[in-house]
Image: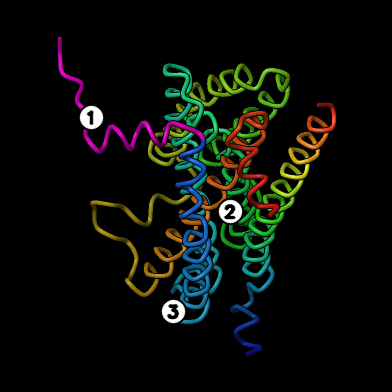
Amino acid sequence: MSEFLNMGGYAFYVWTSFALFFLAMAIDFISLVLKEKSIKRNIRSLMRRKKNRQ
Amino acid sequence: MHKQRTNALVRFYHKLGSPPSFYRISGYFLKWLLLLAIGLTTWGLYDGLVLAPADYQQGDSFRIIYVHVPAAWMSMFIYAVMGVCGVIALIWRMKIAEAVMLASAPIGAWFTVIALVTGSLWGKPMWGTWWEWDARMTSELILLFLYIGIMATYSAFSEDTRKAARMAALIAIVGVFNVVIIHYSVQWWSSIHQGSTVSLTGKQNITWDMLRPLLFMAFATKFYYGYSMLKRARIYLLETESNKRWVQDIIMEKKS
């Protein structure tokens, strides 16, 4: 196991690369989920305001 | 008088061109794209980090290839998609093309960042330098600026989203030449960067045990791009058509 983690002495370079890959994908995914939620919330409150004016 | 021909393909094209249909049809694919992306990534990582043998020259550092190369391929592929959509958006004023183009930019920029930084992390132990102003690396950096420029242009003209999308499309189209430069940079200039390891037609310079994880990761990133792009395009359509009936129906539907 420690041999695997050591990556033949290149541990820092290999693991940082893979960590960055996951970090970028995770940020993209989370920002999508948050954006969808906030857009839907905005549209809903817009509709409610319209309804109240009528 | 000529007869109007409406075959299934033409009908499908028109359907995809309308925001409500696009929203509905893309909704069927989202879950599967994400599942495929996660599944292939999990297997590709295990295959690439554990099963693939170490390189006889580069040792275990070559394993960076499994994130570096798929990300670099995607950074160029996504830009090409944006160029094509940019042309369609400018000539036919097709709103879906605008949505796909703009929705591709953030994920394309992320893949470019991954390609640049992992390249740096691979270059340090192999070439002894983090960065070199060489043709391959410089043109990939310009690609990142193009992605950022497209996103910035769109948000700068955000009062009129259709006009903003067309301005962004213009940059996307002009920037396509850079993708060609990235691809041929290792042949046209003497570069510190190695040539292609994998080619679609020629002889492969890589054994199957090392190539297999690369293909898994290449498909995984394609599927994640599909997911991220469709999801963002859907959000874009909701946002820009928020006063249309179909959007309000969807919002009401979700609530009940």
- In the rendered image of this protein, does residue B136 appear above or below residue B195? above
Q: Quadrant of the N terminus of chain B?
A: top left
Q: Badge 3: how crowded within 10 Å, few (<14), some, or many (20+)?
A: some
Start-end of magenta stretch: B1-19
Task: Give the mark nearest the N terminus, 2 or 1.
Answer: 1
Mark on residue B6?
1
Task: Give the mark nearest the N terminus, 2 or 3.
Answer: 3
Label 2 to label 3: alpha-carbon separation: 21 Å
Q: Residue at x 32, y 61 (%)?
A: B205
Q: Please tell me whether mark 1 sits on a helix, a strand or a loop.
A: loop
The amino acid type, in three-letter code, at marker 1 is Thr
Q: Please tell me whether mark 3 sits on a helix, a strand or a loop.
A: loop
- The numbered mark 3 sits on a residue in which chain? B
Mark on residue A51?
none
Q: Is residue B128 left or right of residue B184?
A: right
Mark on residue B53?
3
- Contact check, label 1 and label 3, Cβ < 8 Å: no
- The numbered mark 2 sits on a residue in which chain? B
In the rendered image, residue B128, in percent from the top left (x then y), is placed at 63, 57
The amino acid type, in three-letter code, at marker 2 is Gly
The amino acid type, in three-letter code, at marker 3 is Pro
In the rendered image, residue A21, in percent from the top left (x then y), is placed at 62, 60
Label 2 to label 1: alpha-carbon separation: 50 Å
